[in-house]
């Protein structure tokens, strides 16, 4: 319940109130909760989530494009890492430090990108 209160406080999911003051979550609120969770799973912060929930928000496209760029960069880095590790498994050198392909990979690969 603490998370729900926090999301209410930051304006991401604000439930209706009953006449006695209890929070009341409609189907729309539940759908919104799921969207917030999905956005968090792709690394979005609550302020970013709040910006993308409404189509008319001025910076919505900018936030989404920035997240897509980050995801694409992560995907490319993971693909490179997969190729490197697959090579290491099949590498004929007794030490990977003696392998030219391994050395080239380690010199070229950027550190894993942090959140934008």
Image: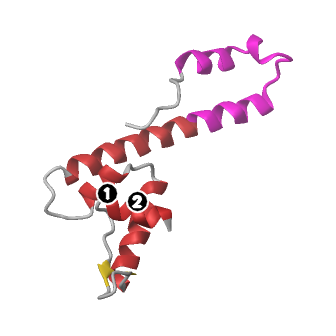
**Where residue 75 is drawn, which disc sits there?**
none
Q: Position of residue 80 (x, y in %)?
A: 57, 34
Q: Considering only vertical position in the picture, is 70 above or below 39?
A: above
Q: Position of residue 49 (x, y in %)?
A: 32, 56
**Where residue 6 is drawn, which disc sits there?**
2
Q: Residue at x 73, y 15 (%)?
A: 99
Instruction: Please indicate whether residue 76 sits to the left or right of residue 103 in the image.
Output: left
Q: Considering only vertical position in the picture, is 80 above or below 56?
A: above
Question: In this orientation, which residue lies closer to the viewer: 21 or 99?
Answer: 21
Extreme residue toward the bottom, this view: 19
Question: In this orientation, which residue lies closer to the viewer: 50 or 65?
Answer: 50
Image quadrant assignment for residue 71 = top left
Residues shaded magenta:
80-108
Image quadrant assignment for residue 93 = top right
Q: Residue at x 33, y 68 (%)?
A: 13
> What residue is disc 1 on?
10
**How was the colour assigned to the protein in this rendering?**
secondary structure
Residue contact between numbered discs 1 and 2, judged by CB atoms under 8 Å: yes
Q: Residue at x 35, y 42 (%)?
A: 69
């Amino acid at each position: 319940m603490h998370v729900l209160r926090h999301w209410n406080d930051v304006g991401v999911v604000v439930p209706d109130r009953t006449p006695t003051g209890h929070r009341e979550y409609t189907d729309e609120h539940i759908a919104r909760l799921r969207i917030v969770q999905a956005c968090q799973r792709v690394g979005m912060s609550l302020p970013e989530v709040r910006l993308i929930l409404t189509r008319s928000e001025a910076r919505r496209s900018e936030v989404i494009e920035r997240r897509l760029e980050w995801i694409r960069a992560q995907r490319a880095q993971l693909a490179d890492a997969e190729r490197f590790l697959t090579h290491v498994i099949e590498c004929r050198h007794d030490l990977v430090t003696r392998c030219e392909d391994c050395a080239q990979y380690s010199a070229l690969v950027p550190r894993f990108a942090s959140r934008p």
